[in-house]
Amino acid sequence: MRNRVMIGVSLLVLLAMAGTQPAAARWGCGAKAPGGGVSHNGNEPSEAAARADALEDCKNVSGTTCQIISCFPDIDTIEQARAKWPLPPSGPGVKEMHCGPAFGVKC
């Protein structure tokens, strides 16, 4: 009887584990402006969303059309985005804008 109970419990655990799926990867992209400005984002639900947001953010900051540098999954935080696509050094004409869901400010 005890062996049947253990087998039944083991099957229930396996069935429960089979029904769970890993968390979806969050995306981030970096974009650059012709003048050297860089925009980056992370924690986007898809690559397409990350691309669109990075281009829009870059255009809002630079005032010009931008190009995607690259995109990667598993960019879940702004720190990861900064490490992947660092901003240029501070100086004249360089501004850092914090916006998006991570900051609670619409870009």
Image: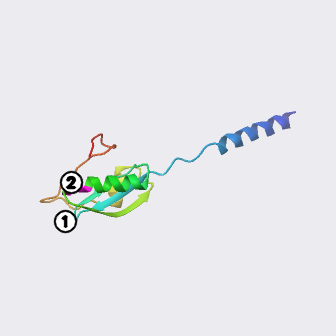
Q: Is residue 105 above or below residue 81?
A: above
Which quarter shows the N terminus? top right
Which residue is identified by label 2?
Answer: 61
Which residue is identified by label 1?
Answer: 35
Residue appearing at x 23%, y 63% in the figure: 33
Q: Quadrant of residue 16?
A: top right
> What's the residue type where badge 1 is placed?
Gly
Q: Main secondary structure of the magenta part?
A: helix
Closest to the observer, 63 or 92 = 63
The alpha-carbon separation of the residues under discs 2 and 1 comes to 11 Å
Q: Quadrant of residue 75?
A: bottom left
Work out which residue is located at the far right of the displayed protein and give it: 1
The residues colored magenta run: 58-62
Work out which residue is located at the far left of the displayed protein and give it: 92
Q: Position of residue 12 (x, y in %)?
A: 73, 38
Please tell me whether residue 73 belongs to the stretch shown in magenta. no
Q: Position of residue 30 (x, y in %)?
A: 33, 59
Tell me the colour scheme of the image: rainbow
Closest to the observer, 20 or 51 = 51
Q: Is residue 80 visible?
A: no
Q: Position of residue 29 (x, y in %)?
A: 36, 58
> What's the residue type where badge 2 is placed?
Val
**Cβ–Cβ under 8 Å for marks 2 and 1:** no
